[in-house]
Amino acid sequence: MNRTIKGVASVLALVMLAGCTDASAKLPDSSTAIFSVGSKTVTKGDIYANLNSSIGATTAINNANKVIARAEIEVTDEMKKDAESTLESYKSYYGDTFTTYLEQMGITDTEYMEDYLIPSLQAAELSSKYIEENFDKIAAMYTPRKATLLSFTSEDDANAALSELKDGSKDAATAAKDHNSTSTGTSEIYTIESTEIDSTVRTVLNSAKPDDGWTMVPASDSSTYVVLKVDDNDPNNFRDEAIEKLSSVTNIQNDSTTYWFKKYGFHIYDKAIYDAVAADYPDNLVQNLPAEVTE
């Protein structure tokens, strides 16, 4: 029974990605009986219809993601170690429940690791690779800056720290500690999407340059005073750190999804799956997007 359902699920994944002559994919042997209860007979078509409506969209997206990730992201030794570690933690935490789950799925430990855990790790790298391939454009749009920010609740403390930083008598960490700030004084990466900092501070940060040195900016709520210095405004000088920071931006993650699904020509022919993906995974639905204009 489990093997039959697994087989139908596999067909479901294939049908959704294959061309159909109409707007509704069908199994060629949909009338084949699977089991009967009294006068009720359940066929392959019944199971397919149920799977199609309940997990069709998710199956399509997950399988497409797996295909794209395998094509774009190399499996590293670190990924293998991470997958093995995750597998062992599942087995240790869930015990017999996890073993039973694998048996019901009809797969071994190794197959679970290779078909699920490693592809998931590969897929997680797609945003970073998208940013790497489009770095100049994305950096210009999101303006990553490496800067040091010290936050104070008192304007007097902020000005005192600012004076010491300008004359070089104290470093950032010491100036913060000596004037009642919990800031670490560590240089970090910020972008226009960095919601952890005040909007006014973010605006100043975006326009400031390393040569400007230290400056004090009252936050928009007038309850916080930020002493800041831009350490580097050329993302190419801290490219890897910038990519790591940018890869966590939701809009970039969404753009990455669209980029890869468009590159690989993801197309849905089944109307029910199309509607479900449009509702739940709009960034993956690329078949109606206009062609990019190249200059």
Image (tube, rainbow, N blue to C red):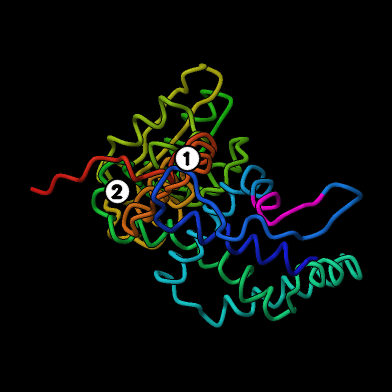
Q: Nearer the viewer, residue 256 or 191?
A: 256
Q: Along the horizontal axis of the image, is 190 left or right of 175? A: left
Residue drawn at the location 24% of the way across and 53% of the way down: 136
Magenta stretch prevailing secondary structure? helix
Residue drawn at the location 91% of the way across and 70% of the way down: 96
Q: Mark 2 Cα within 10 Å, few/some/many (few <14, many 20+)?
A: many
Measuring from the top left, give residue 51's x and y in whole percent: 66, 50
Secondary structure under the numbered disc 1 in the rendered image: helix
Q: Nearer the viewer, residue 17 or 204?
A: 17
Residue contact at pointers 2 and 1, CB within 8 angstroms = no
Which residue is disc 1 drawn over? Answer: 271
Which quarter shows the N terminus?
bottom right
- Amino acid carrying label 2: it is Ala
Which residue is disc 2 drawn over? Answer: 139
Q: Nearer the viewer, residue 26 or 234?
A: 26
**Would residue 123 be counted in the magenta stretch?**
no
Question: Which-is-in-front pick, marks 2 and 1?
Answer: 1
Measuring from the top left, give residue 69's x and y in whole percent: 46, 66
Q: Which residues are magenta?
A: 41-48
Measuring from the top left, give residue 214's x and y in whole percent: 36, 39
- Amino acid carrying label 1: it is Lys
Q: Along the horizontal axis of the image, is 135 left or right of 74? A: left
Considering every residue shown, the one lying at the far left of the view is 295
Choose the circle earlier in sequence order: 2 or 1. Answer: 2
Secondary structure under the numbered disc 2 in the rendered image: helix
